[in-house]
Amino acid sequence: MFIYKGITSKLLFSSSTISLLKNIIDIIYMYFNIYDTYPEFEIIIHQDFQKNPNVPPETRSGLIMLSTDIQYDYYQQITWQFSHELVHVCKGYKESRKNWLYLQDDNDEEILAGGIAISIIKEFYPTYDYKKNYSKTNLSQCEEKAEFLKKSLQIK
């Protein structure tokens, strides 16, 4: 079982993936100044993924739902999806969010989540073509946000 700073999962991750997830959590928590108390969320595979492999990952109260195949070691996809969804978790946690609503592509939080995910994926997997399967209309805004965040994100 994965347990780290309030994020848990019963999924079977390799030690490399566990290290990666911890690193992502540390980076994003630092960005949001989350140090003492943590949001409590469980990483699961999206319940609709088996029926529809195109279902997007999402965050709901208490759940980070990834859309990935049975191989949880698909590093780039996990990095991309988890980084994006963890931003929503942290923003919601800081705002004491009770309702987890779908956000439009032009929403500031959605652009921030995309920007942070792009920054992290470029650092850890610079050859990963995140644009290939990008389905949102905010790609250019997210890339601008990623460029802006370069100095404020402390990626190791």
Image (cartoon, rainbow, N blue to C red):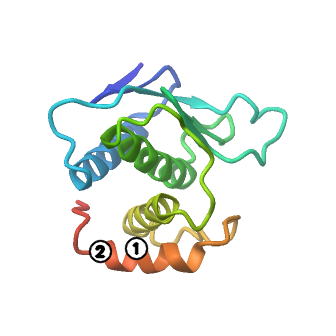
* Left or right placement of residue 42 versus residue 91 in this view: right
Residue furthest toward the right? 51
- For the C terminus, which image quadrant? bottom left
- For the N terminus, which image quadrant? top left
44 w.r.t. 126: above or below: above
Amino acid of disc 2: Lys
Bin the neighbour count of mark 1 within 10 Å (Cα to Cα): few under 14, some 14-19, many 20 and up: many
The picture places residue 12, in percent across and down from the top left corner, at: 51, 25
Cα distance between the residues tagged 2 and 1? 6 Å
Bin the neighbour count of mark 2 within 10 Å (Cα to Cα): few under 14, some 14-19, many 20 and up: some
Q: Residue placed at 26% from the left, 64% from the top?
A: 153
- Residue 146's tag is 1
Q: Residue placed at 54% from the left, 38% from the top?
A: 100
Amino acid of disc 1: Ala
Picture quadrant where residue 119 is located: bottom left
**Observer-nearest of 104 and 153:** 104
Q: Are marks 2 and 1 in contact (CB under 8 Å)?
A: yes
Q: How many marks?
A: 2
- Residue placed under numbered mark 2 in the picture: 150
107 w.r.t. 49: above or below: below
The picture places residue 108, in percent across and down from the top left corner, at: 47, 64
* Left or right placement of residue 56 versus residue 10 in this view: right
Q: Secondary structure at mark 1?
A: helix
The picture places residue 41, in percent across and down from the top left corner, at: 43, 28
* Left or right placement of residue 73 versus residue 87 in this view: right
Q: Residue placed at 44% from the left, 67% from the top?
A: 115
Q: Secondary structure at mark 2?
A: loop
96 w.r.t. 83: above or below: above
- Residue 19's tag is none
Q: Residue placed at 38% from the left, 36% from the top?
A: 18
